[in-house]
Image: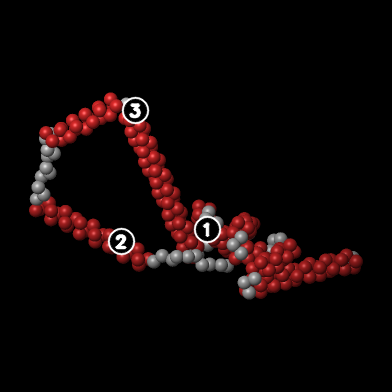
Amino acid sequence: MKQLIIIVCILLQGFVLYAQKEKKDIHKGNQLYEQKKYAEAEASYKKSVEKSKGSVQGNFNLGDALFKQKKFDNAAQKFTEIAGSSKDKTVKAKAYHNLGNSLMESKKLEESIDAYKKSLMNNPKDDETRYNLAYAQEMLKKQQQKDKDNKDQDKDKKDKDKKKDNKDKDDKDKKNDPDKKDQDKKDQDKEGQDKKDGQQQPQPDKLSKEDAERMLEALKNEEKNTQDKLKNKKAKGVKNRIVKDW
């Protein structure tokens, strides 16, 4: 029995010593992080994680160090692991928040929106996450509009190129076919004569004084509504960048 107790004590001492080394690595990493030596901090946090893979503090700080070095994909992977493994809602909310930031930096807007929503599910009172969500949604809306505009421009260019090709083909046909050229000239002459001899387009009825006053009043109301909307938008304010690190 005494021998068994001695073995247990030795094991406990070894465990405590190992835990102390893990905390020492985290502490060192924190010091390096504060000095903005993020690569060295990353190495120190990795050492702590090797000693305790389930360390929330070590893993979380490692994710932060990766983010600071713009290793956004690696940071996203780390925060995804933390959010998926932790049962603490506070930890999950913070992990999803930073996951959203990492995805945002990688221009993965739809995924970042999903991450921010999950963060708010775990902590509905976090106003910064709520702002980041709104910011990501606005960025996605602008990106979709830009893609649509580019698509429309490409379509317009193709239509213009097609018209130009058809015109070039038509000019070539006229050059090779004198009869077609003469017929086109006759058609143009006939169209000009029709315009000269044809009936004039009916003139619109003269606008009454009452109609003019109603139209003027409608324009004034529309302008007032537009100004009110602009004032409301200005009052709410819009932040230009996301600033939050855990």
Q: In this image, 63 relative to 47: left or right? A: left
**151 relative to 177 in the view: left or right:** right
Look at mark 2 in the image and give the residue it sits on: 229
Q: Residues within 10 Å of mark 2 (few under 14, many from 20)?
A: few
The amino acid on which the numbered mark 1 sits, given as a three-letter code, is: Met
Q: Read off the residue under disc 1.
A: 104
State the image coordinates of residue 91 (x, y, percent, origin top left). Answer: 60, 63
Vertical order, 198 against 224 (above or below): above
Assign a secondary structure to mark 1: helix
Residues at marks 1 and 3, CA–CA distance in whole angstroms: 60 Å
Earlier in the chain: of badge 1 and badge 3, it is 1
- Residue placed under numbered mark 3 in the picture: 176
Mark in the foreground, 1 or 3? 3
Q: Position of residue 142 (x, y in %)?
A: 42, 54
Q: Residue at x 41, y 51 (%)?
A: 145
Q: Amino acid at mark 3?
A: Asn
Tell me where residue 35 appears, x and y as whole percent: 63, 74
**Badge 1 local density, few (<14 within 10 Å), some, or many (20+)?**
many
Relative to 85, say whether 241 is above or below: below
- Give me the residue at 70% from left, 68% from top: 44
Closer to the chain start, of discs 1 and 2, is 1
